[in-house]
Image (cartoon, rainbow, N blue to C red):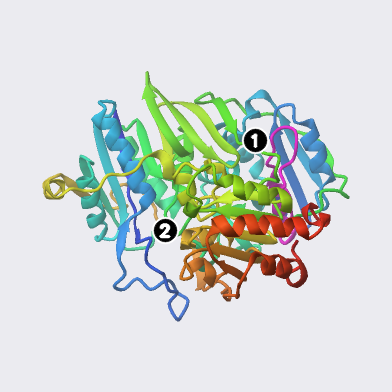
């Protein structure tokens, strides 16, 4: 049994979610290959070769893989699929876009956002916004799976020495063309990978007020997130959204500020190790999942929190590795 | 240009679902059902294209039990021109639904398929991508903006790091994200008018599609519950607990 993991990357660096998918692959077999398809992506192939547990990197470098468009990636994955029992793809926006397209061509039923692997054909995934766990069995010859990163520890990014094998590019599909990308720039850690996250909801009241969260985020070395209500209200962009249809994260510390805690939001953060809720409504559902709750006006609590963090020493902002 | 939209009948987003005692599924008796919210957004976008004179006809499709007719009536009240129910009492999985949509899209010669990005019951987020793969059409998933001109669709997508814009040749498949639009409400006159709009029923067999499930559900269970913790009195106490008790800062 050989498993193919599709690398997520930006042609320069391997995205951390790939490491969680490699770790999921280890539960299935001993032979793991990674596909790196990109443009000018040699450094990514080299990083993939160092991931612990990877036997081979299959590297397809071609202009039409530069923007990770599913129309071009899917035929490549389909060409390679015959040699594999499972194809694992990180459940990122790129992975979720790609995996079902591959499965359609292979005529297999894809499995989305798997959080646990019970055996080679049996998997656990969440449904109903994380309120139900479904254990499902696939009879398809090739299992196409997107892997939810919070379900699997990251594999070590170093220690491996896989062979890099160049793969011929598949034919170009011109039916979709990349126009532009506007990425949210931030000095803070990436939301999906951060160990600490502070999120704001509708209670923040305005985009300006998110600065209060940013100040605390900087003191904690945390990423900033948001509920759907805050994104819909235009306080922050979609890349901040945590929840059923946004990012699903499980940091060590999650601080929810002015977020009531709709099930759709809880779906995105309830596996966090420690949850803190700050909300003026003591009946807010967020308190039912919070380890620590502070009932109060966030405009008083946040400046206090900021001062208290200043008092408690310089080690707080360091990211533990 | 004809536009096809699929609408799924799902447990309403405000219902707290319960797993049946035997783990065979969730309790659906006497539970409020609604049109999947993402499908409502997809439908709204299609109706706006018709109102703008870009689309000529909006066809709403629903696949499932006879009760999906209600969902289609809602879609018709919201502006779809006609409805097609693919009636099937067996469980329909995303791949089967995608195959049904493929056949209907070919039969109706649609040039654009707009689907919700995911159904809020099974959270699969697959059908649009599957349909695009089956048809070999370009796809733009998680759309937050859609424009059509000169045989091309320009779509802005919500991706992990921000936004991405793609240009697709038509025919194409688009999946709607939350911020594509704000759907309208069905007005009473439109609900009445919807009763007169055409609604056709067909079977998967008539469409020549094998809808047998590929995935077998072994069981459903409740996820581990989190216990509510402690309410604290001050930010100072919070910092102290995080530092000395939880040891996360």
**Residue B78 position in % (x across, y down):** 23, 45
Q: Nearer the viewer, residue A10 or A107?
A: A10
Chain letter of disc 1 in the image: A
Element marked by disc 1: loop
Picture disc at residue A185: 1
Q: Residue at x 68, y 61 (%)?
A: A253
Quote the CA–CA distance across marks 1 and 2: 46 Å
Q: Nearer the viewer, residue B133 or A21?
A: A21
How many other residues sit within 10 Å of disc 2, few (<14), some (14-19) or many (≥20)? few
Where is the C terminus of chain B found, in terms of image quarters? bottom right
Q: Magenta residues?
A: A4-29
Picture disc at residue B212: 2
Q: Is residue B116 left or right of residue A115?
A: left
**Residue B166 position in % (x across, y down):** 51, 28
Q: Residue at x 61, y 36 (%)?
A: A184
Q: Does the magenta segment cover residue B210?
A: no
């Amino acid at each position: 049994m050989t498993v193919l993991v599709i690398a997520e990357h930006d042609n320069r660096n391997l995205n951390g979610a790939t490491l969680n998918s490699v770790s999921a692959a280890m539960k299935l077999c001993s032979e793991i290959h990674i596909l790196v398809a990109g443009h000018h992506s040699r450094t990514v192939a080299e990083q993939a070769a160092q991931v612990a547990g990877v036997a081979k990197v299959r590297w397809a470098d071609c202009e039409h893989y530069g923007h990770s468009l599913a129309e071009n990636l899917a035929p490549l994955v389909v060409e390679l699929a015959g040699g594999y029992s499972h194809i694992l793809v990180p459940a990122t926006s790129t992975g979720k876009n790609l995996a079902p397209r591959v499965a359609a061509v292979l005529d297999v039923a894809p499995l989305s956002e798997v959080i646990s692997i019970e055996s080679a054909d049996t998997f656990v995934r969440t449904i109903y916004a994380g309120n139900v766990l479904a254990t499902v069995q696939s009879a398809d010859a090739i299992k196409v799976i997107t892997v939810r990163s919070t379900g699997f520890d990251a594999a070590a990014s170093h220690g491996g020495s896989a062979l890099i094998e160049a793969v011929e590019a598949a034919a170009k599909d011109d039916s979709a063309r990349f126009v532009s990308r506007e990425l949210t720039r931030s000095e803070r850690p990436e939301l999906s990978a951060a160990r600490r996250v502070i999120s704001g909801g509708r209670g923040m009241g305005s985009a300006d007020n998110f600065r209060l969260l940013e100040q605390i985020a900087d003191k904690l070395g945390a990423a900033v997130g948001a509920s759907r209500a805050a994104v819909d209200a235009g306080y922050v962009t979609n890349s901040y959204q945590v929840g059923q249809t946004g990012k699903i994260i499980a940091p060590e510390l999650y601080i929810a500020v002015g977020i009531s805690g709709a099930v759709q939001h809880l779906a995105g953060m309830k596996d966090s190790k420690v949850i803190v809720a700050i909300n003026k409504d003591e009946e807010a559902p967020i308190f039912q999942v919070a380890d620590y709750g502070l009932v109060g006006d966030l405009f008083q609590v946040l400046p206090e929190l900021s001062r208290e963090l200043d008092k408690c020493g310089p080690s707080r902002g360091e990211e533990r590795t | 240009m004809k536009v096809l939209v699929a609408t799924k009948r799902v447990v309403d987003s405000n219902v707290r679902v319960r797993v049946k005692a035997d783990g065979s599924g969730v309790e659906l008796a006497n539970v409020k059902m609604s049109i999947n919210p993402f499908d409502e957004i997809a439908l709204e976008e299609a109706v706006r294209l018709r109102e703008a004179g870009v689309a000529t006809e909006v066809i709403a499709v629903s696949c499932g039990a006879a009760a999906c007719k209600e969902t289609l009536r809602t879609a018709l009240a919201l502006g779809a021109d006609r409805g097609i129910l693919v009636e099937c009492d067996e469980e329909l999985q995303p791949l089967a639904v995608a195959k049904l949509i493929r056949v209907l899209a070919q039969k109706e010669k649609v040039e654009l398929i707009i689907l919700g990005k995911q159904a809020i019951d099974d959270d699969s987020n697959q059908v649009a991508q599957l349909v695009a793969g089956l048809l070999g059409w370009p796809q733009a998933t998680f759309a937050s903006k859609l424009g059509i001109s000169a045989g091309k669709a320009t779509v802005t997508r919500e991706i992990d790091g921000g936004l991405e814009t793609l240009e697709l040749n038509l025919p194409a498949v688009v999946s709607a994200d939350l911020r594509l639009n704000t759907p309208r409400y069905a007005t009473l006159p439109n609900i009445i008018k919807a009763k007169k709009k055409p609604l056709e029923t067909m079977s998967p067999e008539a469409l020549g599609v094998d809808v047998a499930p590929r995935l077998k559900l072994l069981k459903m269970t409740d996820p581990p519950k989190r216990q509510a913790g402690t309410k604290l009195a001050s930010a100072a106490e919070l910092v102290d607990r995080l530092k000395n008790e939880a040891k996360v800062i």
